[in-house]
Amino acid sequence: MNTPTPPPAAEGAAYLAPVGARIGHVHLQVTDLDRALAFYQGVLGFEVMLRYGDQAVFLSAGGYHHHIGLNTWHSRGGHPARREGAAGLYHAAILYPTRADLGRVLGRLQAAGYPLAGAADHGVSEALYLDDPDGNGLELYWDRPQAEWPRAADGGVAMYTRALDVAGLLAAGT
C-alpha cells in the first residue's frame, strides 16, 4: 500500500494544534479478550463500561465513556502486536493523577507478578514501561507540577532519563 507523503507546509503557514487538544482514548486489537480484560480491569483497575460479547469491551477510569477499547475483530488468536523491524504503535501512555496513584498501580503490578520493561525519572514525570498481554507497549506515568520541571538556561524544558526511585514510588502508594 502506497501512502502519499504530505506536502511540505506552506512557508509562514505553520499550524499548531489548539491548546486543549489531547488524545481521548486508545483502541487496541487483542488476541484474547478475556486475557486482556484480566490485565486492564483486574490489574490496572479500569472499569468495564460496555461489552460486546466476546468481541469488544470498552473500559474507563471514573465513568468516562471509554479510555481504552479492546477488540478481537481482526486479531482473535493472532500474533503479538510488536514485531522486530515493523512500524506501529510504540506505546500508549496512561496518565495517573498523582505519584501515590502511580505507586499503587506499581504495587498491583508487583503483586500480580507482572514484569516491567523499564522505569525512568524524566524530570517532568516518573514512568513505568511494560507490555500488555498482547505485546502492546504501555507507559504508566504521572506528571510533576510544571513549576518543578527542570529547565534549561533559555527557560525551555530540560527533560532527562534517570533511574526511577522505585522504592520511593512504592512507598508513596501505601
Image: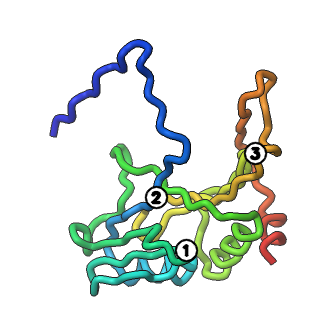
Please state the horizontal and vertical placement of residue 86, each as a whole percent of the image: 33, 45
Secondary structure category for the residue under label 2: loop
Question: Residues at badges 2 and 3 in contact (C-beta under 8 Å)?
Answer: no
Q: Which residue is mark 3?
A: 146
- For the C terminus, the image quarter is bottom right
- For the N terminus, the image quarter is top left
Amino acid type of the residue that numbered disc 1 sits on in the rendered structure:
Ala
Q: Which residue is pictured at 38% across the width and 69% down the height?
A: 69
Amino acid type of the residue that numbered disc 2 sits on in the rendered structure:
Gly
The alpha-carbon separation of the residues under discs 2 and 3 comes to 22 Å
Secondary structure category for the residue under label 1: loop
Question: Residues at badges 3 and 1 in contact (C-beta under 8 Å)?
Answer: no
Q: Earlier in the sequence, mark 2 or mark 3?
A: 2
Q: From this viewpoint, which residue is outermost toward the top?
A: 11
Of residues 86 and 103, which is closer to you in this image? 103
Q: From this viewpoint, which residue is outermost toward the left?
A: 1
Q: Which residue is pictured at 31% across the width and 77% down the height?
A: 56
Category of crowding for the residue at label 2, using alpha-carbon neighbours closer than 10 angstroms: few (below 14), some (14–19), many (at least 20): few
Amino acid type of the residue that numbered disc 3 sits on in the rendered structure:
Gln
Q: Which residue is mark 2?
A: 24
Q: Is residue 172 above or below residue 19?
A: below
Please state the horizontal and vertical placement of residue 111, each as a whole percent of the image: 67, 81
Quadrant for residue 136, please give it: bottom left
Please state the horizontal and vertical placement of residue 168, each as a whole percent of the image: 84, 64
Q: Is residue 63 above or below residue 86?
A: below
Category of crowding for the residue at label 3, using alpha-carbon neighbours closer than 10 angstroms: few (below 14), some (14–19), many (at least 20): few
Left or right: where does residue 56 sit relative to residue 103?
A: left
Left or right: where does residue 62 sit relative to residue 103?
A: left
- Residue 61: mark: 1
